[in-house]
Image: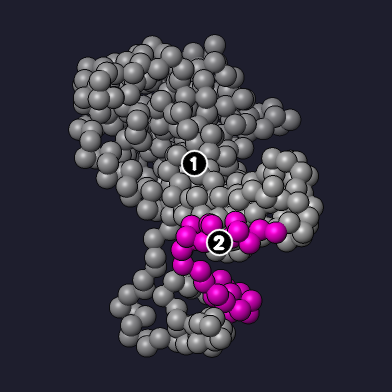
Amino acid sequence: MAEVIFMPRLSDTMVVGTVVKWHKKIGEKILEGDILAEIETDKAIQELEAEYNSTLLYIGIKEGESAPVNSVLAILGSENEDISSLLKQNKINNNYKRIFISPLAKKLAFDKGILLDNIKGTGINGRIIKKDIERYNNLDDDDKKSSNEVNHSNIRKIISKRLINSKIESPHYSLFIEVIMDNLIKLRDSINEKKYLDKISFNDLIVKASALAIKENTKINSSWTEKSILYHNKINIGIAVALEDGLIVPVINQVDEKSLRQISFEIKEKVIKAKEKKIKSNELEGSTFTVSNLGMFGIDSFTSIINQPNSCILSVGSIKKKPIINNDKIVIGHTTKFTLTCDHRIIDGAVGSDYLKSLKHLLQEPLNIMI
């Protein structure tokens, strides 16, 4: 019996999916575990596996097309099976907008970064052809100078919704500290002198220290619900990663129990996967605390919006060389500014301050991070 395969919900926030690539053609036999297609969600590109042996009888969403969750993606069944009744039955599901475009026009639009939603095709049956792209690209120069309209990506829509909800739902306040980083710099240099090992970054050390400071201040590791406060037993740190079209937060689980090498490896691996849109949805879920580091961009200090359902987010600035008073003498040292933004429904000022005190001690006496 033929079976309809619908556009799956591959993440908790997914509303629309885009078929990036079909790995099978109509009429081709499929074995259990074969990759059918690559689907782009609001967060990543994920592979869709076949769950049983069958034949691909119908493709409902072509490469490059987008459709809502539960739209007809494909039909699988026996070779030469009659699927006319299934197509008729599921016709109502595929009422999304399709874009018909010639291969040459598609390549031209991609090269010039032109979105297709607002282009009216003049080819047969409204197909977008090369001259439609060229005409759109040659708009009046004055219009080009005044503005350039770019439609929202799926990930940008999700980010907007989450940040607005976070600001509305949780009363934010921020605490600021400045940490002397000279001992941390010496420790990192000492670790990285061993050339046969992968380099440890300052962010790796800060992530580890942030988890150990949570261990000393467990109230930080919490979430607000309508009925109660959840105090999490595992310390899972979300790492904010900037992408070309938005922000994504891969999660490193149980950071306090992992070695610095393990943490460093996982961060590098997940950042690469996130930027290539190959990260899986379960690698983006379950954070209990978030670290956002803009130090590599030369930012001195900043505040962040809380990544719900976390109760706090730690913002990390750049390492700056400056005069420091040490034993009543002025010396040249290195400092970094940290900002802890908290949900005041859960985290009172004293609790947040105690956390930053623990974090500062760990970073200024960093051998404690290694123990």
Q: Residues within 10 Å of mark 1 (few under 14, many from 20)?
A: some
Q: Residue at x 78, y 55 (%)?
A: 79
Q: Could you give the CA–CA distance between mark 1 and mark 2, rounded to whole angstroms?
A: 29 Å
In the image, residue 316 lies at what x, y percent?
Answer: 39, 35
Q: Residue at x 70, y 59 (%)?
A: 82
Q: Is residue 67 magenta?
A: no
- Look at the image and tell me whether residue 302 can be seen: no
Residue type indicated by callout 1 = Ser
Residue type indicated by callout 2 = Lys
Q: Secondary structure at mark 2?
A: helix
Residue behind mark 2? 88
Most frequent secondary structure within the magenta stretch: helix
Q: Is residue 103 magenta?
A: yes
Residue behind mark 1? 11
For the C terminus, the image quarter is: top right
Q: Magenta stretch: give its range.
A: 82-111
In the image, residue 291 lies at what x, y percent?
Answer: 41, 33
Q: Secondary structure at mark 1?
A: loop
Left/right placement of residue 12 relative to residue 179 reads: right
Q: Nearer the viewer, residue 134 or 120?
A: 120
Please report whichever mark, 1 or 2, sits nearer to the chain's N-terminal start.
1
